[in-house]
Image: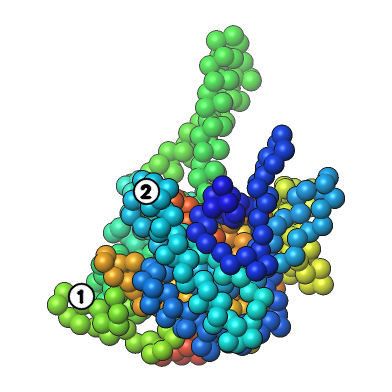
Amino acid sequence: MESSHYYWGLPSVPFLLARSAINSYWEEPYGPEAYSRTKEFRPTPENHAIRDVWEANLAFKVHAVLESHGVEWTSTDIACFGWKDDDFFLCRRKSPSCLTLWIGVMKPEGFDEMNTEQKGKYVREVAHVIPECLALLHEYGIDDVDVEIRHSTVTLCGQLEAPLPLDPVPDERLPPNTTIGHTFRPKDNIKLRGSGGFFVTTKGDPNRLLLVTARHVLFPEGDNRHFNNIDANQPRHNVVLVGGDPLVEEHLSGFEGMRRREQSLYDVLSAKEGNSSNVVAIRSKLTRLESLLHELNEKRNRAEDSIFGHVILSPPNNVFPIGRDHRHGGDSQKIDNQEFDPIAEDWAVIEVDSSRINASNFKGNVLDLGEKLLPFRGDFRIFKLITTLKKDDPTSPIAISGMGHILRLNGCVPDESYSKPIQVLKHSHSSMLNIGRSTGIPSYFRVRRGNGWSTRLKAWPVYPLMTRGVFARSGDSGAAVVDRSGRIFGIFFAGASSCAPGATMDVSFVMPVKFLRERMEQHGLHDINFEPILTQ
């Protein structure tokens, strides 16, 4: 009961294997309506001692303990939990926060088919690492942090499990508006899909518009070569803008539903009234709807009309290879990254086709929070978003400007902010608008590849800010993550969740923009402007 319900309230409800129970506790549901208490993520204390030692040494010692016991760990996070105060009628006080060394391990094959004795033996073997992890914490004078182990796997969030339709509907709003979060895929691969990140330009060519996104939504896993389109005569790796965005699909289905209703009304009235003025008006409206739907269906068969640009730069993805050497087609390539503490590198730069952009209509990077944010159009989701932000930090309201629902991006988050808790937002293909919190303490993760593991990589975690909410889903890779004042924090590319198929992300991993800026500079994109304004 505890294993299955301890993380009730988290997006994927992972399976608890073991915990130290220093500060954490759990109560089995009781009474006529025995509901599990709801777990929630809490802000990580800003002045806790673990902030100073985690990156410096502690994380690597924890990994050494796990590997010495043969534990197939997937991620290590410093998270903070509490029980949501959903028992107001019982006059319960809000539970205290519990800082936790949160360890994800791979679910073994056949675990669900094991009997109780076999499961118990497996769990006891995994739990052996907890006393050693606690001893490590005590070495650094930390005695108030729990250690918890759960089943979890890390996945890159650009590939969808099922093939997409052969002829996805292009976004009918071409030339596209400049709100970030458009849905993209490579022209020659319908199984990949992700979100556009943010626009940039360079000082050398201020009217050459570039888009930064995640690499793995544009290249299949087997192709991990360095890609650099420096020769105009070499084949282009084209990227298309597709209509998989839920708002576009809702828009199109709305037109189709309207057409069906008008057709039904026309059939009824024409039988009763013949050729009356009402029937003529409905027939005229029906003709216009059918014409629009015909035009959209024509676009289904012209995928080339939706080409948005082509990839000009994408270094190898260091999440894919086993170790630091990656063989492709008989050639050995080295992943040029940090030696001891590598940050996950999974990015690509797209040059936007100039015919798709109207310079006079280009407003730079803006995040559309949705028209329902406007007065008298509010819905519960947007209301909850704003009130949650205010409740979490009432002194710093979200910076909304312009049309009332537009958040204009302005530069990048300062480097020193990555070591502090910060609220962030994202608008993307699958999960649309969501908010979360970065703790300021990086996570480490590994990805299983065949019979081996990728190198240990570092990324900045984002946890959902709203109880029962999610920050990202599969298909959101490449989306820009920004703080509440519109400064770019990084791009989302992967997440950790329970091992259940289709589970949503408990922890979302972000590549920081400070790292992306540094790597793009190293690859020849100098003097990058994160607030582009076009003149041509």
Residue 485 in the image: state x and y as whole percent.
Answer: 70, 73
Query: Along the polypeptide, which appears first: circle 1 or circle 2?
Result: 2
Residue 355 in the image: state x and y as whole percent.
Answer: 43, 67
Res. 316 image quadrant: bottom left
Q: Is residue 159 visible?
A: yes
For the residues labelled 1 and 2, the Cα–Cα distance comes to 39 Å
Q: Which residue is mark 2?
A: 114
- At 38% from the left and 68% from the top, the residue drawn is 72
Closest to the camera, between mark 1 and mark 2, is: 2
Q: Left or right of 308: which side holds 32?
A: right
Q: Are marks 1 and 2 in contact (CB under 8 Å)?
A: no
Along the line of sight, the residue nearer the viewer: 382 or 323: 323
- At 38% from the left and 90% from the top, the residue drawn is 339
- At 59% from the left and 9% from the top, the residue drawn is 272
Q: Amino acid at mark 2?
A: Met
Q: Amino acid at mark 1?
A: His
Q: Which residue is mark 1?
A: 328
Q: Secondary structure at mark 2?
A: loop
- At 81% from the left and 68% from the top, the residue drawn is 394
Identify whether 330 is placed above or below 521. Answer: above
Along the line of sight, the residue nearer the viewer: 292 or 331: 331
Q: Secondary structure at mark 1?
A: strand
Residue 39 in the image: state x and y as whole percent.
Answer: 65, 56
Residue 275 in the image: state x and y as whole percent.
Answer: 57, 15
Along the line of sight, the residue nearer the viewer: 364 or 85: 85
Q: Left or right of 72: which side holds 436?
A: right
Identify whether 290 is placed above or below 379. Answer: above
Using a 10 Å C-alpha cutoff, classify the residue at mark 2 as few (fewer than 14 neighbours), some (14 to 19) or many (20 or more).
few
Using a 10 Å C-alpha cutoff, classify the residue at mark 1 as few (fewer than 14 neighbours), some (14 to 19) or many (20 or more).
few
- All told, the count of numbered labels is 2
Outermost left residue: 330
